[in-house]
Amino acid sequence: MNMIELLKAIFFGVVEGITEWLPISSTGHMILLDKFIKLNVSDAFLEMFLVVIQLGAILAVVVLFWNKLFPFKRGEKYFIKKNTMVMWAKIVVACIPAAIVGLKWSDEIDALFYNYITVSIALIVFGIWFIWIENKHKSSSKELSIKTIDSLDQITFKAAIIIGLFQLIAAIFPGTSRSGATIIGGLMLSLSRNVAAEFTFFMAVPVMFGASLLKIVKFGFDFTSLEMGVLLSGMITAFFVSIISIKFLMGYIKKHDFKVFGWYRIALGALVLAYFSIIG
């Protein structure tokens, strides 16, 4: 087995684990990373790998938030936690728009938008939007004394659908950032940063399980030893790095806003556009 390819996969896993949860676009970073670090695999495997590697990151959410995600509680006998079931219903509703578009037009979206130009523009545009939303969010809260939604239970089905439409934007345009788009949607609906982040994490579970399953079925289950090693190396690395990233983000947003990520997105998008315009 080629050790160099496994090391490349581990590096992809590190980038995935960091960028999946920070609102800076994991897909965008993976597309850009592929421009500089080429895995020696087929195009079909690479297309599958860039999606399924996210499954490792999603498993970190399941582990860290198991008590909030698992709808059954064990006492003298198992019983259903009503609040958790309602939350899952809201998550399902929020995921419907992206699921419909993904199932019907995923190949067309990949062909049209999975390139560095789209990624760079999306990084910049949503970076600016992040900064604007944060400034507006602060000023509105001070001037109008808007009550912040600080519990997952307070998210309405209407709010869930609106957040789902923001996720749809990210599903179409790589570089937008699924977490970034849904967090922006949450902030616009007066969700606290903590609640917006958690709901975003939870929405990712069915989305990425579904997307990974579709990509694996499309690719087939006939993996070479190298392909299996690359896939597992990337997923396992993404899992452990994601645990660190999620804990960092949840601690960070207790004292800080998201503007730093907006500035990062703008700088990265501009740098990438400049780089590729120079090298042609």
Image: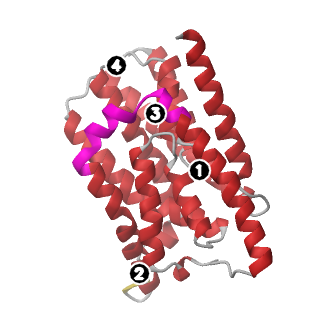
Determine if the magenta segment contains residue 118: yes
- Alpha-carbon span between mark 2 and mark 3: 34 Å
Residue 79, above or below 226: below
**Residue assigned mark 2:** 86
Q: Amino acid at mark 4?
A: Val
10 Å crowding of disc 2: few (<14), some (14-19), many (20+) = some
Q: Earlier in the sequence, mark 1 or mark 2?
A: 2
10 Å crowding of disc 4: few (<14), some (14-19), many (20+) = few
Determine if the magenta segment contains residue 246: no
Q: Amino acid at mark 2?
A: Val
Residue shown at 38%/86% (left/top)? 79
Q: Amino acid at mark 3?
A: Gly
Position of residue 244 measured from the top left corner of the image (x, y, whole percent): 64, 48
**Can residue 244 be seen in this snapshot?**
no
Quarter residue 96 falls in: bottom left
**Residue assigned mark 3:** 234
Residue 25, above or below 194: above
Q: Earlier in the sequence, mark 1 or mark 4?
A: 4
Which of the numbered marks, if any, corresponds to residue 243? Answer: 1
In magenta, the rendered stretch is 103-120
Residue shown at 44%/18% (left/top)? 5
Q: Nearer the viewer, mark 1 or mark 4?
A: 4
Q: Are marks 1 and 4 in contact (CB under 8 Å)?
A: no
Dominant secondary structure (helix, strand or loop) of the stretch shown in magenta: helix
